[in-house]
Amino acid sequence: MVGSKDKSKEKREKRLQEISLLRTIPYSDHQRWWTSETVAVVTGANRGIGFEMVRQLAGHGLTVILTSRDENVGVEAAKILQEGGFNVDFHRLDILDPSSIQDFCNWIKEKYECIDVLINNAGVNYNVGSGNSVEFSNMVISTNYYGTKNIITAMIPLMRHACQGARIVNVTSRLGRLKGRHSKLENEAVRAKLMDVDSLTEEIVDETVSEFLKQVEEGTWESGGWPHSFTDYSVSKMAVNAYTRVLAKELSERPDGEKIYANCFCPGWVKTAMTGYAGNISAEDGADTGVWLALLPDQAITGKFFAERREINF
Ligand code: NDP
């Protein structure tokens, strides 16, 4: 008898095969809105999914800025791609450090003037099973949520005004889902607040993560209905998902010709340093949906959540 785990494995493998095939189909001239002057920035790109997104975007002919918080490691990573003939540039960027963000923006302004695509990939996880600590929860929320928000806020004024729109892609996770099989959130009030996209604001998302951090500090988080496994990480990705919806709503008010589309995606469970290389897919497959989203020919898709090139529920 085939169990439900085997069935979902079979389904996933079938979808991955379909996507590998789709990846081999070149974009037509009609679909290609970008040129070699189109600039994409990827955060945390010295390794893993970020590095792979840089490689794939550069493979499609864009100019890609590989960023890394460690200068030496980033330069080496960029060199690998440059030696492979890819149009890849490097600059240091630590999304936790306001002066590094400012320095990066100044450099972009001087060298490129503006960018077309921002992929927020940098992230950390320290949770193992249900383990948690005040130090790590602060670090995870600061990096994954506030760091992502800070780089987005700094880069928006540098995003190109163009008819095809600029694009923001946030790398999140199904662990941050509010409903469905992967959701481990038991706090109904938080779920209701974050699900109500019409009333959702950045302040509500900030308050939610502050409440979580307060409960971690007080040692009461376990009875607070937060996800028990990968707790900080799940809350951080839940916050980025919600923020993506708020951001998309705000950006949709921009006039035509100045639009910026913001979406998020889950790469799957990927063999990278973050998972101790224990995932069930390669970084190449994990990067695919992010690259596909960044290059969508007919944008106007915004505020959505994707996995394996399909929209999924938040
Ligand atoms: P890695 O740990 O391999 O990569 C994470 C990257 O983020 C590294 O380059 C790391 O830099 C960088 N980073 C961390 N903190 C900062 C910071 N303050 N400023 C700039 N860069 C920083 O993991 P993955 O490639 O797996 O993860 C990439 C993204 O995908 C993350 O957002 C992760 O949450 C998400 N994701 C991953 C899944 C998986 O199964 N692997 C599943 C779902 C989502 P450094 O090398 O210096 O540490």
Image (cartoon, rainbow, N blue to C red):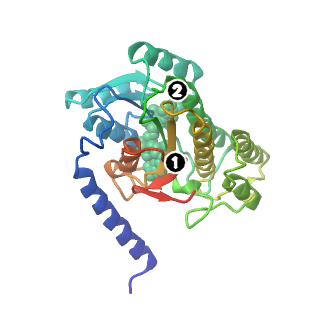
Is residue 106 visible from the viewing direction of this image?
yes
Q: How many marks?
A: 2
**Looking at the image, which residue is at 70% across and 42% down?**
201
Q: Residue at x 42, y 71 (%)?
A: 8
Judged from the image, the secondary structure of the residue bearing numbered disc 2 is: helix
> In the figure, is residue 22 to the left or right of 224?
left
Tell me which label, 1 or 2, sits earlier in the chain: 2
Task: Single out the residue that lies furthest toward the top.
Answer: 110
Query: Foreground: 228 or 266?
Result: 266
Residue 172: image location, x then y, percent: 52, 48
Which amino acid type is shown beneath numbered disc 2? Met
Mark 1–mark 2 Cα distance, whole angstroms, equals 19 Å
Quarter location, residue 253: top right
* Above-or-below relation of 287 to 82: below
Circle 1 — which element?
loop
| Closer to viewer: mark 1 or mark 2 | 2
Q: Which residue is mark 1?
A: 172
- Residue found at the far bottom of this picture: 1
